[in-house]
Image (spheres, helix red, strand yellow):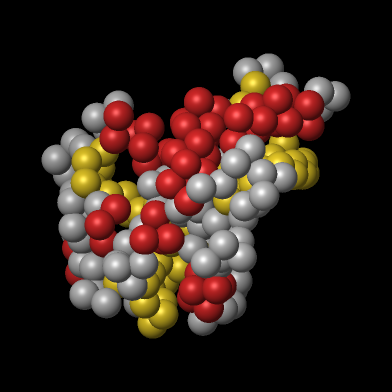
Amino acid sequence: MTDFSLIETLRYEPDTGFVRLRLHLARLTRSARRLGFAGAAAAAARLQEAVREAEGPLRVRLTLDRHGAVAVTTAPFTPLPADALWRIRIASTRLDSSDRLLRVKTTRRGVYDAARSEFSPDQADEVILLNERDEVCEGTITSIFLDDGHGVLKTPPISCGLLAGVLRTELICQRRARVARLTAADLHGGRLYVGNSLRGLIRAELMV
């Protein structure tokens, strides 16, 4: 299947530039190489061009298709307040851990859209997906992190069927997080967080 594009969604701050740019570009390059997509080398220049006249924080979305075409769009971005608390629910929609495309961020988002549609915005700020073994995987737009009181966040391994999120990668490299298989029951045993590179870590509450 090549009827999709690769995506990177970045945060841009006028004073400091792109947040986690190196990790975003590394993931894009790695995914493009794995799938045989050309054009990843042009991404950095296209991103800089898109924000040349930016005066405030931006959400920047870059896509790379199988022909090597790069497209960049921007929109104003308002960070979440530091005390934000997201309501989280678990979807009945399941991920297939054998689907290797789940490890790549693409425009193929049918399963995530299906999970998100199970709850209205009034019922949940984010929705968690499990795999066929009922292991926790990820949210529709976030990685999952659990603080069980041992000082290092737990986050599900890629082998469960999930994306190597950029924030997740950074936290693992900083030894602030480590991989561990989690069940839905585990999520009640500590402080739950969700997060991505755009928004950072967000405190979360699992709704039942």
Relative to the observer, which residue lies in front, 38 or 103? Answer: 38
Q: State the quadrant of the C terminus.
A: bottom left
Relative to the observer, which residue lies in front, 145 or 44? Answer: 44
Q: Residue furthest left?
A: 150
Q: How many marks?
A: 0
Rendered location of residue 26, percent (x, y): 47, 32
Rendered location of residue 29, percent (x, y): 50, 36
Identify which residue is drawn at 67% across, 49% down: 67
Q: For residue 139, what is the image quadrant?
A: bottom left
Identify which residue is drawn at 50% across, 26% down: 22
Residue 191 in sight: no
Q: Residue furthest top?
A: 15
Q: Is residue 201 above or below residue 204?
A: above
Identify which residue is drawn at 49% across, 74% down: 111
Residue 170 in sight: yes
Rendered location of residue 123, percent (x, y): 53, 75
Q: For residue 45, what is the image quadrant?
A: top right
Relative to the observer, which residue lies in front, 34 or 19? Answer: 34
Rendered location of residue 131, percent (x, y): 30, 72
Q: Is residue 4 above or below residue 195?
A: below
Identify which residue is drawn at 43% across, 46% down: 34
Relative to the observer, which residue lies in front, 38 or 57? Answer: 38
Q: Is residue 25 above or below residue 153?
A: above
